[in-house]
Amino acid sequence: MADINNVVLVGRLTRNAELKYTPGGMAVSKISIAVNRKFKKGDEWVDEVNFFDVTIWGKTAESLQQYLLKGKQIGVEGELRQSRWEKDGKTLSKVEINANKVMLLGGGGKSESAPNAQDTAPAATDEFMDDITF
């Protein structure tokens, strides 16, 4: 059986998208979304917020740039990617979502007349990841 790496989240943008280009000319947009969850702890309901970093590639990153504004609710489907590096002799890592689809949902943002869904360009290779400096 093959391994599965798929995640679907709905949340709100915590900041405006950052659109940049790799030295090879590939568009890449970095966003962060807040996803709320409510659960019962004892007799009380507790709210918890989780924050996730998302990377959007290619034409999708370019075409959605004007709509990816702080507070906008979006849906993201993609895969988890783990980056590892060394700093001061310690190995560090970070898990991000590499978006395959981004859906603009209601609330927040600049315009409600934005396209409803976009597929991203083919998944970026690790070669592109090494070229990005944020």
Image (tube, rainbow, N blue to C red):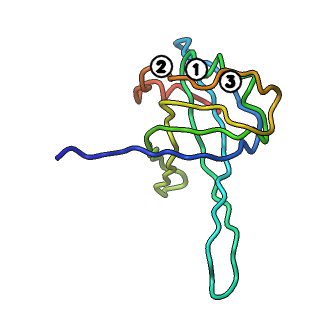
Occupied quadrant, residue 14: top right
Label 2 residue SS: loop
Marks 2 and 1 in Cβ contact (< 8 Å): yes
Q: Nearer the viewer, residue 21 or 100?
A: 100
Q: Earlier in the sequence, mark 2 or mark 1?
A: 1
Q: Residue tagged by mark 3?
A: 19
Q: Amino acid at mark 1?
A: Thr
Residue 43 appears at what percent x and percent y?
67, 87
**Residue 104 percent across, percent down from the top left:** 66, 32
In this picture, residue 110 sits left or right of residue 26: right
Q: Residue at x 63, y 88 (%)?
A: 42
Mark 1 crowd level (few <14, some 14–19, many ≥20, 10 Å Cα): many
Q: Which mark, residue 121?
A: 2
Quadrant of image for the C terminus = top right
Which of the numbered marks, if any, corresponds to residue 60? 1
State which quadrant residue 76 falls in. top right
Q: As displayed, is residue 31 above or below residue 25?
A: below
Which residue is situated farthest in the top direction here? 25
